[in-house]
Image (spheres, rainbow, N blue to C red):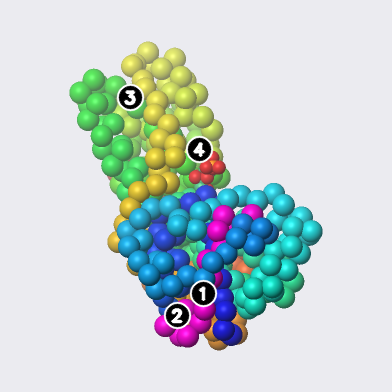
Amino acid sequence: MKKIAVLTSGGDAPGMNAAIRAVVRSGIYYGLDVYGIFRGYSGLIQGEMKKLTLGSVGDIIHRGGTILYTARCEEFRTEAGRLKAVEKLKQAGIEGLIVIGGDGSFRGAQKLTQLGIPTIGVPGTIDNDIPSTDFTIGFDTAVNTVIRCIDQIRDTASSHERTYVVEVMGRDAGDIALWSGLGDGAESILIPEAHYHIDEIIHRLRRGYERDKKHSIIVVAEGVGSGVKIGEQIKESTGWETRVTVLGHIQRGGSPTAFDRILASRMGAKAVDLLRSGQKDQMIAIRNQDVMGIDFDVALAQKHIPNMDLYELAKILSI
Ligand code: F6P
């Protein structure tokens, strides 16, 4: 194998740049030409690619976002779109492709493998919702960002003796809410993977107020529903001053944490190793600190479940 390419796809995540850097630098170290494809599958269909050098990926390890840009591409969902993509790769002589993105991007990557382009996926999303890996690139940074924001909200919550509902991202997964809620001592954490009843949330709030607690934080994962609605329900039932903050895209940006930079460096380099050794149709995962390749079919057949021990612990600690 002489020529490989890398692209980022789906929502950006902090650490994607560190992963691109690892692919490019380790590829060049082993004597490969490494191409960057711009704007995900959409750019691939248009043939937007460029050979990357050691210098192309200098000064990016600490930057959020992705220097390759990213996109969600409808055309690539069609057979005709995918055939165009394969044509572009073949014209450029590219023999292997590394896709940094989420599970939707990996399903696209699998289709490319079936069409004759060996592909490896690197999990990059703040949601941590990819099955078979303990962590995805960007999750740790997003949790740290949310925790910083909630710390600040807590200052106002305590000064004004208010209840705050904070809605966080995560698509259908509760990981961001769970980890940031535990890390921030939230009174309640609402995640799609666990049933909740509004009466129970209110009971917990009242119990706190009875022991003279003056403010409360409730973290709601977007997959549960609208934080605004939950705030309204609490206000209606208790009559307490309640505010809602929807953190939104602030959670996707920012300089990656040390954890994400190191994870991205390990995963990017592992993806190159797998392609060099003739592997394909796999995604990179980290399990108990080990970075490994797992067949897409096996990895994606699993269902992602957050660490529910943390959920139970948060309940105990917020008594
Ligand atoms: O997958 C990352 C994510 O930020 C989710 O948490 C969120 O549901 C979604 O992307 C938002 O997508 P967009 O940026 O297209 O609005």
Local secondary structure at mark 4: helix
Mark 4 sits near ligand 1, with its Cβ under 8 Å away: yes
Mark 1 Cα within 10 Å, few/some/many (few <14, many 20+)?
many
Residue type indicated by callout 2: Ile
How many neighbours does mark 4 have within 10 angstroms: few (below 14), some (14-19), or many (20 or more)? many
Image spot of residue 167 (x, y percent):
43, 34
What is the quadrant of residue 28 in the picture?
A: bottom left
Label 2 SS: helix
The x, y position of residue 87, in whole percent, is 73, 68
Which quadrant does the N terminus fall into? bottom right
Which dot, 3 or 2, sits closer to the camera? 2
- From this viewpoint, is residue 24 visible? yes
Among the two numbered marks 2 and 1 on one chain, the one whose residue lies closer to the N terminus: 2
Image quarter of residue 269: bottom left
Give the answer, above or below, for where 81 lies relative to 262: above
Q: Are marks 2 and 1 in contact (CB under 8 Å)?
A: yes
Residue at the (72%, 75%) spot, across then down:
116
Given residues 141 and 85, the one toward you in this image is: 85
Mark 2 or 4: the one toward you: 2
Q: Is residue 67 magenta?
A: no
Q: Which residue is mark 3?
A: 163
Q: Which residues are magenta?
A: 27-42
The residue to which callout 2 is attached is: 28
Residue linked to disc 1? 34
Mark 3 to mark 4 CA distance (whole Å): 18 Å
User: Which residue position holds label 4?
Assistant: 222
Q: CA distance from mark 4 to mark 1?
A: 38 Å
Up-down: is 193 above or below 212?
Answer: below
Q: Name the residue type under label 3.
A: Thr
18 vs 202, nearest the viewer: 18
